[in-house]
Amino acid sequence: MSESPLTETNTEVDRHRRIGVTNAWAVVVDSLAFVIKLGVGWLVASPALIADAMHSLSDLLADLPIILLARIARQRPDSDHPYGHARFETLGTVMLGALLLTVALGIGFETIQLLFSDSRPSPSGLGLATVVVAIALKEGYFQYAIRQARLARSALIEANAWHARSDSLSSVVVLIGLLATLAGFPALEIIAAFIVAVMIGWMGIRLAWQAIQQLVDQGVDDERQTALLEALAAIPGVRDVHLLRTRRMGPDLFVDAHLRVDSRISVSEGHQINEWALTRLKTQFDDIADVTLHIDHEPDPQDSQVRPLAPLRPTIESLLADYGVRDYDRLIIHYHQQRAQLELRFATDAQCLAARDLCQRLLNDVDWIADIVLTLSGERLSRSTH
């Protein structure tokens, strides 16, 4: 038994709105950074600024697939994607993580070139001011985006925020290079570039690795597993919780579990216990999107031997008829370890007595019938209309 949302909740609408607005600001900031760096770099003939402008252009181009993937991830489940499209967002996070690692390798390569270079860019007041403005733009966007990523629980926005910071950090390297050249300490640029490359590379690896874990259905940690088990075990009527499995789908958590209940309760009571368990989990944990519960009436077998399945109602009714047992009002079937326990209800004592010997013979002949109980039909009470 499971429950899956068919329409977006207010929380989901707010989340997607945050992602959309944050991505729009990314385009605005990257466009401004590119235009400012390129214009000033061309004006003061600074190769460092022009190269940094190309980095901002790459950020701007990277924003476009991120926006596309975010839109796809918002789509509701369909026949081809019954669990939704949230993993497109996870895919985008992997791509951004790989891009961050590429940026880190690029900075590392440039650092090696600096080691063998005898020339440094000539600093200028306008160039320094441009770099400072670019750093302020990208760092401001990073602070805004990382806050929105946490509110929206979006690894994609977090990865894009760090991608923006990689641009600001590369600008910091340019600034340090200009200032170091002005102060006569050009080696500082190499040290700063190495530190920045390590930071960006590590963040790219971390974000990509976390996203890959989602793509291969990694479950939640032990602490969260324990919290889920305790929430389910606290439901009245639940005797045991086992085979708990979880997986992430973007920001959402999917939960599967087996609940063992009393074997003699009605189907409707078992279903009601299931509904309470669904409600408890989705109320207590706001990131749970879907819960699938299997109701067990007995413990799972400990041995690995596959037992033959006991027959279902049509076969049992046919067998009773073959033995001459036909006048019962109701047949209730219970199963335990692939053996059937039958309860036959009769309207009169005479019918019950007549079926006794027939049922005894059936019980002796068929080994998958554990026992047969004969009872008289009880009177059903109705609510008074007075």
Image: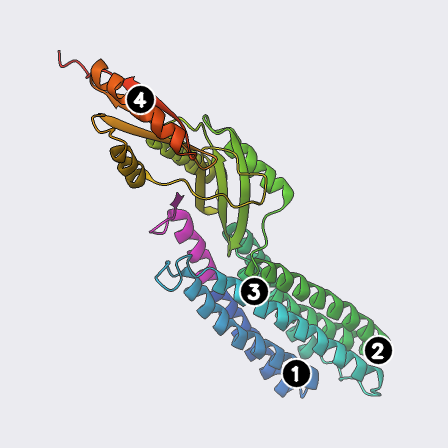
Residue at the spot of label 1: 51
Q: Assess disc 3: are there few (<14), some (14-19) or many (≥20) residues with their C-alpha within 10 Å of its C-alpha.
A: many
Could you tell which of marks 3 and 1 lies nearer the N-terminus?
A: 1
Can residue 326 be found in the magenta stretch? Answer: no
Tell which of 328 and 144 is nearer to you.
Answer: 328
Depth check, mark 3 against mark 4: the one in front is: 4
Tell me if residue 380 can be seen.
no
Please tell me whether residue 151 is drawn above or below residue 60 in the rendered image: above
Report the disc number at residue 93: 3
In percent of the image, x 57 and y 74: which residue is there?
59
Position of 309 with respect to 153 (left or right) is: left
Q: Assess disc 2: are there few (<14), some (14-19) or many (≥20) residues with their C-alpha within 10 Å of its C-alpha.
A: many
Residue at the spot of label 4: 357
Could you tell which of marks 3 and 4 lies nearer the N-terminus?
A: 3
Q: Amino acid under label 3?
A: Thr
Range of residues picked out in magenta: 1-21
Q: Amino acid under label 4?
A: Asp
